[in-house]
Image: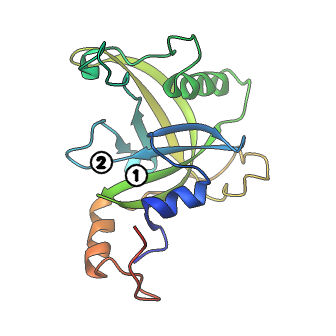
Amino acid sequence: MSDNILSHNEMCRREGISLQRGMNFGLSGNHSVILMSLRNNAPYRDRLEDSGTTLIYEGHDHPKVTSCPNPKVVDQPRTLPSGKLTQSGKFHEAAQRFKSGKRAPERVRVYEKIRSGIWSYNGVFHLVDAWQEPDEHRVIYKFKLVAVKGDEDFAQPVHMDAERRRIIPTAVKLEVWKRDGGKCRLCRKLPPI
């Protein structure tokens, strides 16, 4: 099994926080984290484009609360009731500032849920665009991120000319995971859950 296959606990240990939400902006002040899924039953419509080098990520819904029992029919919010930006709002603002030349692209570590409790680390992406578009019932946020090579050292400035790279398709990751029985090919141990 690849070193890039992790349990949820391993992923949280690596990032130094409990990753309970899909969008996590500005961790440690030098990168963000997105949790994505291309599975059929995923709650959001994330997708890969450009031969697997570009991620189009869907923003996150209003929380399900008594006053909002069905978030899938409510516009995805930019701000909280307090006026502070939601995670979608923070990512959107960073993308707009990049597009206007006011900042470098946000570096984003992307983890993909490939099975319940099993995640694949998809590497570092640059957030390069964001927009709103209508869905069947509401307005949603979309984010464009490109997979890049050689920009993992967050102590260094963002590599503006980083080369694009291709993401291994989910079906291939699942086949490798099944082939190896969920175990590391080197140590033959299961990842801790």
Q: Residues within 10 Å of mark 2 (few under 14, many from 20)?
A: some
Q: Label 1 is placed on what type of residue?
A: Gly
Q: Please tell me which residue lies in front, 94 or 86.
A: 86
Query: Could you say whether the residue bearing mark 1 is in a helix, strand or loop?
Result: helix
Quarter holding the C terminus is bottom left
Query: Could you say whether the residue bearing mark 2 is in a helix, strand or loop?
Result: loop
Residue 138, by quadrant, is: top left
Q: Residue furthest right?
A: 156
Q: Could you tell me how far apart the alpha carbons at marks 2 and 1 are, in whole angstroms?
A: 12 Å
Kindly identify the residue that appears in the image at 25 percent across and 75 percent down: 178
Kindly identify the residue that appears in the image at 44 percent across and 46 percent down: 35
Residue underneath mark 1:
52
Report x, y in % for residue 166.
Answer: 46, 57
Q: Residue furthest bottom?
A: 187
The disc at residue 24 is: none
Residue underneath mark 2:
38
**Is residue 153 positioned above or below 6 on the image?**
above
Q: Label 2 is placed on what type of residue?
A: Leu
Kindly identify the residue that appears in the image at 73 percent across and 29 percent down: 103
Q: Residue furthest front?
A: 66
Report x, y in % for residue 58.
Answer: 38, 32
Mark 2, mark 1: which one is toward the viewer?
2
**Is residue 150 positioned above or below 29 on the image?**
below
Q: Residues within 10 Å of mark 1 (few under 14, many from 20)?
A: some
Comes first in the chain, label 2 or label 1: 2
**Is residue 118 positioned above or below 55 on the image?**
below
Quarter holding the N terminus is bottom left
Total marks shown come to 2
Kindly identify the residue that appears in the image at 66 percent across and 59 percent down: 150
Q: Please tell me which residue lies in front, 81 or 177.
A: 81
